[in-house]
Amino acid sequence: MKHGLILITFSMLLAACSSEDVSQRKVDTTNELSPQTITLEQNETITEIEMNESNQNIKLVNSENNDNVETQSTLFISSQTSEEKEDEMPSLLQEPVEPEEPLVEDYVMIGDSKYINLMQEEKFQDWINVAEKYGAALYAIPYSDVFAIVKEGEVLVGMSTGVASAAPNNIDILCDLMVDKGDATEEIIEGIKQVAETGESVQLNGPQEFGDDFTIEKLEEWIVVSW
């Protein structure tokens, strides 16, 4: 019986010691966890501050970037406007262009017919050379085969297809216009002079290359060569 009481008492002591150990362990565990929890809260607090500061820095960076973008846009617009102004400036500084004067048609009236100037037409260069030799100009009725060498309003020689005529005082010009008649040139020139002196008509056989005969006669105070 005494042994039983001793065992019960010993068991109770062991239980009490075990309870104290557990309690002490709980306390120790609580003490260990508490600083960690506090540390975690501090870390969380520090993290929030850092995050706020980071967000503020990001906002500042974004704000600076926006300012830079706006500044660059402003500079670009300003530069573009300046270039446009530079492009516009020359037109403002250029001297006003005077309107070109309308071309005045060079023509003469012979009788009721209008003759226009042909001195720039290369295909009539042989006749132009003769006209220039005597200080005259070559004219023609538009869209026709009627030509005239005119000087100071006076017709020196009239020409058309197969015929040329001149006043007796202008036979030198008429002779110069006949230099393209090949082998018959000399005979034609002599015939012109003869008709101017005598008034009598002259008939000439033309060269085979032309296939025409020449008639030189005086008609109404004009020496006329036809072929």
Image (cartoon, rainbow, N blue to C red):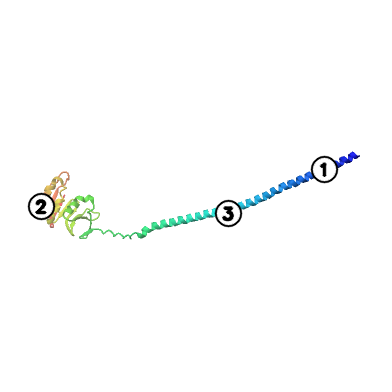
Mark 2, Cα crowd under 10 Å, few <14 / some 14-19 / many 20+, is some
Image spot of residue 39 (x, y percent): 67, 49
Q: Mark 2 points at which residue?
A: 193
Q: Mark 1 points at which residue?
A: 15
Question: Relative to 149, is 72 on the left or the right?
Answer: right
Measure the C-alpha gap from mark 2 to mark 1. 172 Å
Task: Decide: is 16 above or below 70.
Answer: above
Upstream in sequence: badge 2 or badge 3: 3
Residue 13 in view (yes/no) = yes
Which numbered disc, 1 or 3, marks the residue closer to the eye? 1
Picture residue at 52% right of the left edge, 54% below the top: 64
Mark 3, Cα crowd under 10 Å, few <14 / some 14-19 / many 20+, is few
Task: Decide: is 130 above or below 15.
Answer: below
Question: Relative to 107, is 80 on the left or the right?
Answer: right
Picture residue at 79% right of the left edge, 45% below the top: 20
Label 3 secondary element: helix
Image spot of residue 158 (x, y percent): 17, 55
Amino acid type of the residue that numbered disc 1 sits on in the rendered structure: Ala
Residue located farthest toward the top when viewing the structure as drawn = 3
Mark sitting on residue 56: 3
Question: Relative to 25, is 179 on the left or the right?
Answer: left
